[in-house]
Image (cartoon, grey):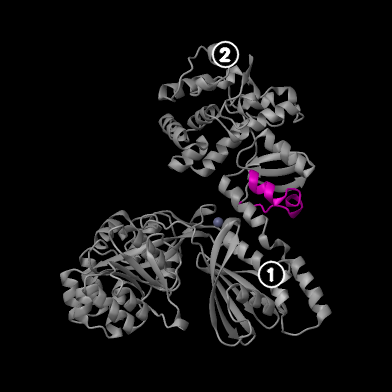
Amino acid sequence: MKFKRRDRSDSPDGPDAEVLVDAETSGSDSQGGKYGQSGVMAAQGKTPETGGSALKVARTASTVTDLPPGQDESHFPVFAGPTGADSDGATSEPSGGNGSATGGQAKDVAVSSSGVGPKTHHRLGELLVRLSLVTEAQVEDALVQQKESGGRLGEVLVDMGVLGERGLVDALAEFYAMPVADLRRDNPDPEALALIPEEIARQYLAIPIRLDEDGLHVAVEEPSDELRFLLAEKSGHTVRLEIAPVNDVRWAIDQSYRAMAGVDKLVQAFEAVEGARRRTSETTATEVVAEDAPVVQVVARILTQAKRDRASDVHIEPSQDIVRVRFRIDGALKEVLQLPVVMGVGLVSRIKIMAGMNIVERRRPQDGQLTTEIDGKDTDVRVATAATIFGEKCVLRILDKNRSVLRLHDLGMPEDTHGTYSKLVRAPFGMVLCAGPTGSGKTTTLYATLTEVSDATRNVMTIEDPVEFIFPSINQIQTNEQAGLTFATGLKSILRQDPDVILVGEIRDVETARIAVQSALTGHFVLSSLHATDSVSALHRFLDMGIESFLIASSVIAIVGQRLVRRICPACKTSYMPTEEERTFYEESGGPEKSTFYHGGGCNFCGNTGYQDRIGVYELLQMTPEIKRLIVGWATQDELHRLAQKQGMRTLRQEAINLVSLDVTTIAEVIRSIYAL
Ligand SMILES: [Zn+2]
């Protein structure tokens, strides 16, 4: 039984779009009031009403059970299924047949693709319940949440944590009767990629995978006829849609449409000019200033790619025969590009000009900073050069000031540790230190702490090198060696500014340490970081610097020792047998009984490392009266450790092993990050 109805009035094309609805499949809808024609409702003997109650969901379920999803396929040999599109999960009129639907229909479908409405979701929800992936109550909760926040039902369920991305994709695949694309294993074919421009891929979240006799296979997060038509039009091929998780699609697009893809041509252009000119190492200003100059373009592309790859640093390193470009991602360097050695001088000169550095000076190390637009967002980059025997090497640190400062709990600090820490950092005066090696996330912890302690009643001032994130309501100062502004002199000037909270980026020398300790003792709350392996060794570091033990005991409130460990890549997480050694380490570290261990087997997503992203590991040493007594008595690190643990401190090792027991990271990673220093 077919009804012609107006589409939902909140769909992008407005109420003009008409969709033919198969009443049997349209199910109950919580948006009854929005229908131009209430005939659908009436025909089903349902009253238009709002709100998706449990009862309603259940009712929908019973309605829909009559129609297995496979039935859609029989209606539609080609794009089987409710065409994403249909805001209400209704099936389009099959007259279009094999994708040769009339223009009008294509438009209708277009309408709904972006405004997928609740009916599809009811049916999808019902399918998910039937597959025992979620419960009806969860679907009901998700529908309520969806009403508030929007989004698709599947996504909401994934966000709620009740459904895995994988489970959702499998269910969607069954729902639409389409294959699942495995972007984790299969690399998109260059031939296929060439058929869909990058902007289209990004706009519609569609990644072409391969071209064969059946047509162009494109992985999408949510299929629709409209998208299929559009992609067919753009590529000039029949399009076969496959389903993949949205994050996989985004990732594959970033990986496949590399910003650096065109670098080869730029290098050729550069070499052609260079060959004609036959010059040696001198680079003219125009070559590194003109926007279209190959060198300028190459620098822009390297930076764009670095940011897309979430790289923290870019290394441009000349060697005898090539210039190597490496990115640091999740703490590890990865080579991404090799350029001809003749380009080296031009690249570094271009970067130095951008960073306001002296391009004539090539022997002395220099520092600079630049701001450039990457993918539409201003990005700050800190530049440092150093002359190696093969020429100037350049390291660019990408400071993503637009990223949000994470809360400590989001960084992986356990709830109880966070609770204690929050109380400690609200002390009116005293010092809290973060300890860890370079790249252990100290700055992130300091910033997250600042957000907890700063409010309108306090004057918060910082002295940093570099300022990695700009807070709107905090007075931040950047050190400047050339201008004589060091941590020590900066800290002195801050003390004359009537501060309440002072952040000293890092304590590197005795002078800074002394002023910081004095500030903490004279009514200021001081936050800082120390380069040390853990909390206890940070105390000894202070003592070694020559700060009197009683001053340390009376100024320091707490020390957070920390590390970042890599998380197991969720895309290739699989169980494995740890070695005898690993098992012993796990048990000796106090890991709870565990029969199955996980690691990443390696896939496209993690560059075959088996890891993706990192999580913080923290140990919190509180300066109890007993610990203070030990410090004043110059106790050994062992003695301090023993007492701290007796008083309830969980060590970095214990915390990291806990992450292994929760399958977040691996034993090998814990050994590497906490013991291989
Ligand atoms: Zn992986």
Q: Is residue 532 above or below residue 14?
A: below
* Side (left or right) of 255 relative to 33: right
In percent of width and height, residue 223 lies at 64, 37
Mark 2 or 1: the one toward you: 1
In the foreground, 472 or 196: 472
The disc at residue 296 is 1
Picture quadrant where residue 329 is located: bottom right
SS at circle 1: helix
Structural distance between the alpha carbons of marks 2 and 1: 63 Å
Amino acid under label 2?
Gly
In percent of width and height, residue 65 lies at 53, 22
Q: Earlier in the sequence, mark 2 or mark 1?
A: 2
Identity of the residue drawn at 41% across and 73% down:
437
In the foreground, 644 or 538: 538
* Side (left or right) of 644 relative to 394: left
Q: Is residue 120 above or below residue 302?
A: above
Which quadrant holds the N terminus? top right
Is residue 191 on the magenta stretch? yes
* Side (left or right) of 389 relative to 151: right
Identity of the residue drawn at 29% across and 75% down:
496
Which segment did they paint magenta? 184-204
Identity of the residue drawn at 60% across and 71% down:
326
In percent of width and height, residue 387 lies at 59, 85
User: Which residue is under mark 2?
Assistant: 39
On the question of residue 516 being in view, the answer is yes
Amino acid under label 1?
Val
* Side (left or right) of 653 relative to 252: left
In the foreground, 253 or 296: 296
The single residue placed furthest to the front in the displayed view is 497
